[in-house]
Structures are given as C-alpha cells and as structure tokens.
Amino acid sequence: MNALFACGGPSAQGSLRNIEVRREGKTVSIFDFYDLLIKGDKSKDVRLQSGDVIYIPHVGPLAAISGSVNVPAIYEAKNSTSLAELVELAGGLSAVADTSRIVVERIADHQVRKVVEFPLDQQAQAFAVNDGDIVRVFSIVPRFDDAVTLRGSVTNPGRYPWKPGMKIRDLIPSASSLLTRSYWLNRASISNGRATEYPTRQTQRVKPPTSEPLGADSQFNPERPANPQLPNPQVPANQQQQSIYDASQEGELRNQDNPVYTRKQITGQTLATDLRKYAPEINWHYATVQRVNPTDLSTKLLSFDLEKAVLQGGEQDNLELQAGDIVTVFSQTDIGIPQDQRSRYVILEGEVMRPGVYKVEPGETLPTLLNRAGGVSPNAYIYGIELTRESARIEQQKSLDELVRTLELQAAQPQSASGSTDSQMLAARQAFQQSLVAQTRRLQATGRVVLNVEPGVKSIDELPDVQMEDDDKVNIPHVPSTVAVVGFVYNPGSFLFDSRGTAGRYLKLAGNTRPQADMKHAFVLRANGTVVARTSVNGLFSGDQFSSLRLHPGDQVVVPNKLETGAWVRGLRDWTQIASQLALTGAALAVIH
C-alpha cells in the first residue's frame, strides 16, 4: 500500500481488485483494494522486498448501480460477482428502497440492449452481474396508505391515521385544536415580561454573586466569577453604581438594594394591535376537504362550515373522510371574508364612561357602541367628537400626495425674466414655491371623518348611524373653554370662549391681520370638523358676514398667507376645499407661508 500511494494509485483504466505482487517470477499476493476500502481488511498487504514487482492489470468488468442505495457508483466486479454482492459494495439498500422492483439494463452479445426486471428476493440475490450492467433500485412511492392530512390554521398540522367511518370531528375534536402554535407563542411573548419592567436607576447586567469573594491573594478560577459587588473603599457608598441580578431569561431586571420598577405603558392602540395580531382569526364558515378519485385521478373539493361541524355539532357539515383526504382550515387572512364577519376593534377615548378597546359586533353603529360603553360623561363635548378611520386616512393621504406632486410639477415649469428686477422677483418666487412644496410634503392626513354634528347636540342618540370599521378611533373631548386664532395675525393663540363672540371679535383679540394675510380666503375650522370659508359666507349675503359668524368652543379661525396670483397658485386659492377633503387642522394649514 505504501508503494501504491507513492505512485498515485491505479489509473482510471487500472484495476483495484487484482493488484499482483510478483517476486522472482512468482505471484506472492493478489491484493483487492475493495477489501480495504469497504471491509477494512489489509491482510493481503505484504511487505515488499528488493526486486519485487507490483503489477496493476487492466480494469475488470464494470457494473453501475443507482437509485435507492447508500453509495450509488460504478463498481469493478469480479467474474463471479452476484447482485447481492454488488448491493453490498454500494453500502446496502436505503431505507426507502423498493425491493419489489429491480431493473437491470444489459448488453447482450455486444449487439442489443435489453432490460430485466424482477423482485429482490433470495433467487434474485444470486443473479450474476455482467460487464456493462446498470442496476437501478427504485424507491417506494411517497404515498401514505390509510392516512388523512390536516393542514392550515390548526394546532398540529400533519398526517393522522384514517379509520373507517372517520369524520371531521374525529380529526378536529374541539375549538382548541384550531389554536396554532404561533398563537400560543405570541400569547407568551405578551406575558413573559419582555420589556415590561425596567430599573429606575443606572444599572448593568452581572452574574449572580458568589458566596466567596476573591481576595487579594486568591487565584483566579474561571469557574468561580469574581464578585462585582464588592464595595470600593475609595468611593462613597451613595455614589457606587448599583448592579443587577439577571433573575430570569425573561429579562427581569432587579435593583438589589431597592427593587423599584417602572411599568411599560400600555395604551389603547397597543392593546388593539395585540388583539389583531395575536387573536385567533379563524375562518369559521369555510373549510375544505381535498379528495382524489383513484379511478380517474380527478380532484374533488368539498367545502363545509367549520363552526357547524366543530362547535355546533351539525352532522351535515361533519363530513365522512376517506383515506388520502386533505383537510384545510383557513384563517381570515388566507381568504378574504365579508366585512361583517371580520373581527373589528375600536378604541373609545375621552369623556366616555368606560373608555377602552371594544370588539364591534356586526352592523354596530357609533351610537350603539357608545351606549354599550356606558354612554358619555356630563362633561362630554359631543359637538367636537372626533372619529378617525384608517381607510379614510389612506385616501386622504393619497389626495395630499397628489397635491404635492402637482405643486412640484408646476414649480418645475421654466419661467423667464426680462430685467434684473424681474430676475430678483423670479428668484424670490421660486424660493417661495420650494418652501411651500416642502412644507406641504410634511403634512400628514389625520383620517378624521367629519360627522357634521350640530352644536346643540347633547345626546349620543342624535349622532349619525355610521357603521364602525376596524381600527376606528373615537375621541370625545371635554367641553373646551377657548377659541383659537392661527395664521397671519399679530397675536395668534387661544382665547376664552364668549357665547357672544364672533370671528371678527376674536380676530381683534388676536391683533387683527398682518399685511401679508389673505382675509379673502380666511376660514373657520369648526370643532366638529366642518369648514366655513369666508368666500362662501359672503357670497350668500351682503356685507362682511364672515366677521359676524358666531363661533363655538373649540373652533379655530385660520388666516392664510396671501399668495401671488398666477397659474401656479390658482389651484391653492381655495383653502376650504383642501381643508374639507383632507381634514387637516387649522394649525397645520397655517404653517404654510
């Protein structure tokens, strides 16, 4: 073997099984390399002497074996090699080998090819392998007999044994079988203390202290960590940094000398998010049984009502299963279901008797939801009720983004100037345009839905019967005591409400308008979300009716900047339309200047 390794071993045309050692004209040993490679036997490896010849003859008969064997390859066979020996050379059959079908491709008389097929039984194991044979060992078909498959939104998806007369309830015995593992993991992540408690002073994580602190003469022991809490005599005790004992894998932090904690704040929004994210949202009214006809291999899809079959015990939907059936349970996100069947959560805040997160029943409206929450408090300002909706916010943001794109396109249009004065005016105009576009881009839609509540409404039963949607947020403020004036006035701010106060009076309290103010397009943003423009009021009556407009608590008077005339700003003149479509606050509009 040392000599074989030194010369690089037999070539591709050399034999591995009939290596001869010749000495003084006689063959003293025939070495089979397969004995060493496969069996670990080197008993035929003789010690060489001076003058010995190692002869490697041409490779012998070759046979290939492929398929479900452990080491498929081309092997050198001896004249008497049987099929069983060839399988043994290939490491034996794999666990999925199909012993009922072995195929041997053979060349007969150097003229034709033929195929021989037989089961691998005792008789076949003695089958002689010839030079050029290709043995194919098939694997069993990945088919499960007498089994049904459960998949989808279930606790334990997988295959289950089928029995005659087996039905849906035998496979899904209760509603608990529909709680997925991710559901329980998410539930555990809420309650396992993840970022729920934090120390109130500067702290650091350390290992638990040992009972034997290291002294000055102690030897370091890596299995016994040093006590990090030993007091430093050079530092006052009240200035020494406090350490923390990591009490659990859940990240609970403890201050050892004063265990004071601060609780992570849980808002209505976080609670609603947790409910949507972690609640089991099962599609109770649609599940399927997939079945293959063994005769023509056609697929049949049977649907059934999961709620009736599992929860209500209805026999009509408790379908009888057959071997090979695939039962699929869907969630509400897998297949879109009607809005009324979805789980919807609404946040009630402000002057509500029982504020919190509520699950909306099908067809429930705003008045019925508020009544279910116990009504409103005596200080509730129903006129200023705010309903924000995610779907409305998305549409409003699209409109706002479209407005920004329009402004950008119009601002990018080239403009010419004839003189130095015109050039300065053009530069100032372009700077103004860029500033207006930048500030408009920063505006974000609120998603407020204007309910157009009358000022004298005192009962929630008088609110419009608007159907509640998922992720709605209702905020009922207390009765405000001020009216705001924002925009281009000398003293913008909030002023005490006066039942006799008008828009003109509050403008006087704010110092009246600045020279660059555009009173022609001033407007009032009511507490109920509606907008009253000066142009709309004065267009119906003679005189300045806008100044005599009576205001209510929480209203805002908005005085915008005077924009120069021209095609670029023509689309921005109607501030009333922008405010009503986007439901922006008056303060946000007033920053555009």
Image (cartoon, grey):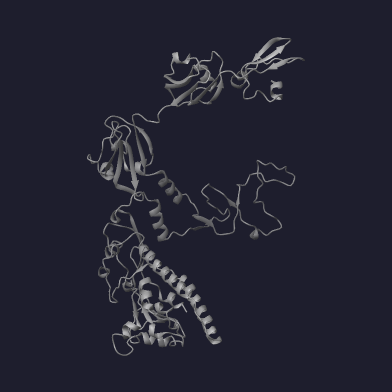
Residue 490 locus on image (x, y percent): 47, 86
Residue pictured at 71% horizontal, 43% vertical: 220
Compared across the picture, whether 103 is left or right of 295 comes to right
The outermost residue toward the bottom is 543
Residue 498 % position (x, y):
35, 84
Horizontal and vertical percent position of residue 162? 32, 31
Give 447 or 36, whichever is nearer the viewer.
Answer: 36
Identify whether 334 is placed above or below 38: below
Q: In the figure, residue 560 lies in which quadrant?
A: bottom left
Is residue 473 among the parts visible in the rendering? no
Q: Is residue 31 visible?
A: yes
Q: Say above or below: 345 vs 248.
A: below
Q: Residue furthest front?
A: 111
- In this rendering, would 469 be left or right of 26? left
For the point 50% across and 54% down, the residue is: 195
Picture quadrant where residue 358 is located: bottom left
Q: Look at 30% across and 42% down and name the residue there.
A: 288
Give the percent coordinates (x, y) of residue 319.
26, 38
Residue at x 40%, y 53% (from the top left corner): 277
Q: Is residue 1 left or right of residue 344?
A: right
Q: Name the foreground residue: 90 vs 10.
A: 10
Query: For this rendering, which residue is in front, 102 or 546?
Result: 102
Nearer-the-camera pick, 442 or 253: 442
Q: Quadrant of the N terminus?
A: top right
